[in-house]
């Protein structure tokens, strides 16, 4: 079962201060993360308006020429949405949200598939990661917006795409978990997602293994993604069959 929302309207560019992206290692130049972000042309910006006309933004992963995968919670109380990718602004035609997703219950089924109103036009799209051996793997993460370090937390908004890497610390049936490390065991471009980075992609090799869902941290540091935070990513391997069935349903209902 899926929930399908139709007739999403095209909106203008809404680059706003609520576009937030990952925090980075305090000893690595930010420019390296921006440069690495260019390696992920299939990660784009999702923009929209809530029912009260508040603008919002997040990220997404282009999976097919007319299909994107993103986080379900981005569409909570949404009335308009579009994507920006490959120098195009494209309206979202239909949104399919997992039928068991509940906005008030973090940690399960935070995934949505969207059918676009026109083709994106990239030369290549990532495959789905179907193995269940994610724990301990090195991964890459990409998303848009502001940044800061693991010491300062979120500080600025630039609207640029950033990407970095990390180890997947652990998993549960629905999520992958990552965290910044103070020890020597860390990747060269250690990175953690931050509030507003939702819907972007976590990749193992060139395959999509996770969709950014949220960050777990104590109340004083909520929304800062500093040392001690743990990021949670919807585990794509669990939803592989649902993704393919949902794409088929969206296209059949579009005929």
Image (spheres, rainbow, N blue to C red):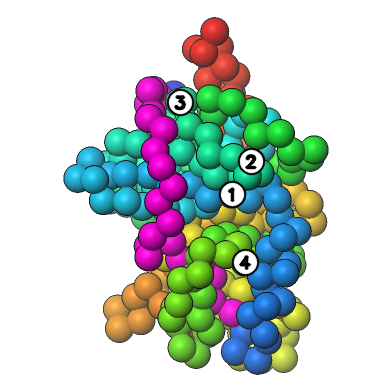
**Which residues make up the magenta segment?**
3-24
User: Label 1 vs label 2: CA separation?
Assistant: 7 Å
User: Label 4 vs label 2: CA separation?
Assistant: 16 Å
Q: Position of residue 71 (x, y in %)?
A: 47, 47
Seen in the picture, residue 186 relative to 173 is either above or below; the reply is below
Seen in the picture, residue 47 relative to 28 is either above or below; the reply is above
Q: Residue at x 46, y 38 (%)?
A: 82
Rendered image quadrant of residue 161:
bottom right
**Residue that carries the numbered disc 1 in the rendered image:** 44
Badge 1 element:
strand
- Answer with mark 3 or mark 4, whichever residue precedes in sequence: 3
Q: Would residue 196 be found to the left or right of residue 191 on screen?
A: left
- Answer with mark 4 or mark 2, whichever residue precedes in sequence: 2
Badge 2 element:
strand
Q: Would residue 102 be found to the left or right of residue 63 on screen?
A: left
Q: Position of residue 203 (x, y in %)?
A: 70, 56
**Residue that carries the numbered disc 4 in the rendered image:** 162
- Answer with mark 3 or mark 2, whichever residue precedes in sequence: 2
């Amino acid at each position: 079962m899926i929930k399908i929302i139709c007739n999403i309207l095209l909106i203008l560019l809404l680059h706003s201060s609520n576009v937030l992206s990952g925090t980075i290692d305090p000893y690595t130049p930010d420019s390296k993360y921006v440069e690495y972000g260019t390696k992920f042309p299939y990660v784009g910006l999702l923009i929209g308006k809530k029912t009260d006309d508040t603008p919002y933004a997040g990220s997404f992963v282009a999976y097919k020429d007319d299909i994107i995968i993103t986080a379900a919670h981005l569409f909570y109380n949404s009335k308009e949405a579009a994507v920006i990718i490959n120098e195009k602004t494209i309206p979202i035609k239909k949104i399919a949200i997992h039928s068991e997703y509940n906005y008030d219950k973090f940690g399960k089924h935070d995934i949505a598939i969207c059918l676009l109103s026109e083709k994106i036009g990239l030369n290549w799209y990532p495959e789905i990661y179907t193995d269940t051996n994610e724990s301990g793997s090195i991964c890459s993460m990409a998303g848009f917006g502001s940044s800061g370090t693991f010491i300062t937390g979120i500080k600025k908004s630039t609207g640029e795409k950033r990407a970095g890497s990390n180890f997947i610390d652990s998993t549960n049936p629905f999520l992958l978990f990552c965290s910044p490390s103070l020890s020597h065991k860390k990747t060269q471009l250690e990175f953690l997602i931050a509030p507003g980075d939702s819907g972007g992609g976590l990749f193992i090799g060139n395959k999509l293994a996770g969709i950014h869902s949220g960050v777990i941290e104590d109340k004083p540091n909520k929304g800062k993604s500093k040392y001690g935070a743990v990021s949670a990513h919807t585990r794509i391997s669990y939803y592989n069959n649902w993704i393919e069935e949902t794409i088929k349903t969206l296209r059949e209902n579009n005929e």
